[in-house]
Amino acid sequence: MMRISLDAPALTAVRSWLAGLPPQPTPRSGRSGSRKAAPVRFHAERLEPRTMLDASMRALLPDLVGASDTGFSNSDNVTSDRTPVLTGTVRGEATQVRLFIDGRRGDLVPVTGGTWTHEVPATAALAAGRHTLAVRPVHSSGRVGPLSRPLNFTVLSAAPAAPTVLLANPSDSGAKGDGRTIVAEPILRGRAAPGQFVNVSIDGG
């Protein structure tokens, strides 16, 4: 049976790696004799806590809720809301998600029925410009899933002024400006900020 010394270089290297210490020099021989590195004492308290990656838990691409996506459409990820409501879904047994906004570790948000929702608090209002949002599913046991794909969205510095809408003169068949007409296919006109688009909705459609 072969005996291995507790001070063997291989065991010393393993103990150093577990303790988070830099690699130790290997023994060298010279004309003055053999030199050997001092044995490293193992300190369990220096180990960082380790988490188990659970690939069965996955977070899908997060999103802004429709009311917080105030741009040209409710899916263009452009908003003037500096405290938007964020949402998303997860697969697996995750009980929470960890938010990462612009790569910075954020809040833990509970998951209910596979869905999570979080409103950015006023104390952490987002600055104007481009931002990224990613989430990581977390189980109450400490297991974590992989990071989701990032959502890229833009916060505008200020909301554009509300546009106006009126019947165009050829379609305003009654008293001008009373909003009444006998024209079944009227022409609408209005004003909006330069460079902006408007959504036209008739009876909610």
Image (cartoon, rainbow, N blue to C red):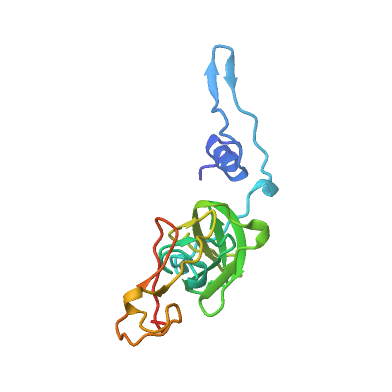
Q: Which residue in the rendered view is the most extreme toward the top?
A: 31
Could you say where residue 126 lies in the image, as x and y percent from the top left? Answer: 58, 55
- Position of 58 with respect to 32 (left or right) is left
Q: Residue at x 56, y 71 (%)?
A: 117
Which quadrant, please, contains the C terminus? Answer: bottom left
Q: On screen, 179 above or below 27? A: below
Q: Residue at x 40, y 77 (%)?
A: 201
Asked if residue 141 can be seen in this view, the reply is no
Q: Residue at x 42, y 74 (%)?
A: 166
Total numbered badges shown on the rendered structure: 0
Could you say where residue 89 lies in the image, as x and y percent from the top left? Answer: 48, 72
Of residues 151 and 141, the one nearer the viewer is: 151
Of residues 169 and 54, the one nearer the viewer is: 169
Could you say where residue 24 lies in the image, as x and y percent from the top left? Answer: 58, 31
Q: Residue at x 68, y 39 (%)?
A: 41
Asked if residue 78 can be seen in this view, the reply is yes
- Position of 157 with respect to 203 (left or right) is right
Q: On screen, 140 above or below 41? A: below
Q: Which residue in the rendered view is the most extreme toward the left?
A: 185
Of residues 170 and 121, the one nearer the viewer is: 170
- Position of 109 with respect to 179 (left or right) is right
